[in-house]
Every structure is written in C-alpha cells, then in structure tokens.
Amino acid sequence: MMAKHRILLLLLLWGTSLGLTAQDYQNEYGTDHRDVYYRLGLTGGWGSTYGFGIELSVLLLEQFDLNAGAGVSFNGFKYGVGGRVYLLKDNFISPYLGLNYVRSTGLPEIEITLDGIVGFYNILADETANVKGGLAIEFGWTRLLTTVGYGFAFGDYDAVPTDGYINDEHQRFANWMAVGGLELSGTLLFRFGRRQTL
C-alpha cells in the first residue's frame, strides 16, 4: 500500500507540473490559444510500457504530451496512461523524460518448457509505474522515440506454479515474464491532426 501511495503522489506531482507549465505558456505569450497535435502509432520492445501495441499521444504544449496506449505482452494485456517532457524545443533530436501508470491483466496457465521438462504457471495481474527517458527524433509528420526505463511493480508478485514439473530454473523464467523490470523499446508516431484550443 505504501508503494502505491508513493506512485500516486508522483503522478499527482507530474500533473501539477503540467499545470504550472501551461501557466508559464500563458505568461510568455499572453494568450490562452495554442495548437494541439495528435499522434497515433505503434510501440514495442523489451518490457515496453504498453507491450506490443498502439499509442495515442496529444501534444498539449510545445514540450509536453499526454499519452495512452494498449497492447499485448508476456504478462497479459497492458493498458495505461502517461506523460512526456521534451527537454529541447524546436530540435530535430530531443532527449525526453516520461512517467506512466500501467495495468497488466496477467496470464493463466502459461506452459514453460525447458530441456524437455514442462511446467505451468499463472502470471498474476499487477500495476506498474514506468519511469523512463530516451531520444525523440522528428521526421516531418513522423516522430521516433527510443526508450530506456524501468517498471516498478506495485505488487511485485512472483509467478505461481500450478502444475507440471517445478524447479528453480522454471520459476526464474516464469518470474522474468511477470510485470515490471527493464524497458528497452521504441515507438513510431504519426501526426494526424491539429486543432486550436482555448
């Protein structure tokens, strides 16, 4: 519970920082009008935040976006929301930092075969806070994101053996499939719309 409270506090601080940035924008330009860009694309990789799936992002400010996505992974169907801060303005390449909240549904009765020996495991549902950074590379209407990060699991559950042969090697492999851990991923986003908002 304490871990979940810490993550929720981080998300609250993140949202507050976005609100402060919006106020800075008004102070700088003296207007509430700004362009909002939409991007839709594909994402995937080792420990990818949204698994192998799709992502929709909204560039609310020049250096900030909010995103949501969903996809499939070794630990079930994943879906979540998050935000990114781009550290350089009007650059072809910019480093960025991101934070996401993601839920995974888990997978029942996964068959794991090692050296001809079969074991069955349940990968439990869990939630993660994904902290990450990387590079954003702009190609006209296309944006490529390369990401390195880590998913901190709220429950940090081990896989649960259900049937078959059970040993340490099988257990380690099943735990590797569970929620959380290292992320090495890529996302390709295509800009498809723009509107002016108040």
Image (spheres, grey):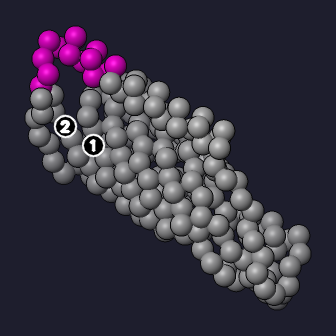
**Amino acid bearing label 1:** Val
Q: Is residue 24 left or right of residue 36?
A: right
Q: Is residue 20 left or right of residue 98?
A: left
Give, as a single range, the part of the protein colored magenta: 20-33
In the orientation shown, which residue stands out farthest toward the right? 167
**Amino acid bearing label 2:** Val
Compared with 112, 27 (above or below) is: above
- Which image quadrant is residue 148 in? top right
Q: CA distance from mark 2 to mark 1?
A: 7 Å
**Label 2–label 1 contact, CB within 8 A:** yes
Return the residue at label 2.
36
Return the residue at label 1.
58
Compared with 56, 5 (above or below) is: above
Identify the residue at image location x=41%, y=48%.
Answer: 81
Question: What SS does tag 1 mark?
Answer: strand
Asked whether 28 falls inside the magenta stretch, the response is yes
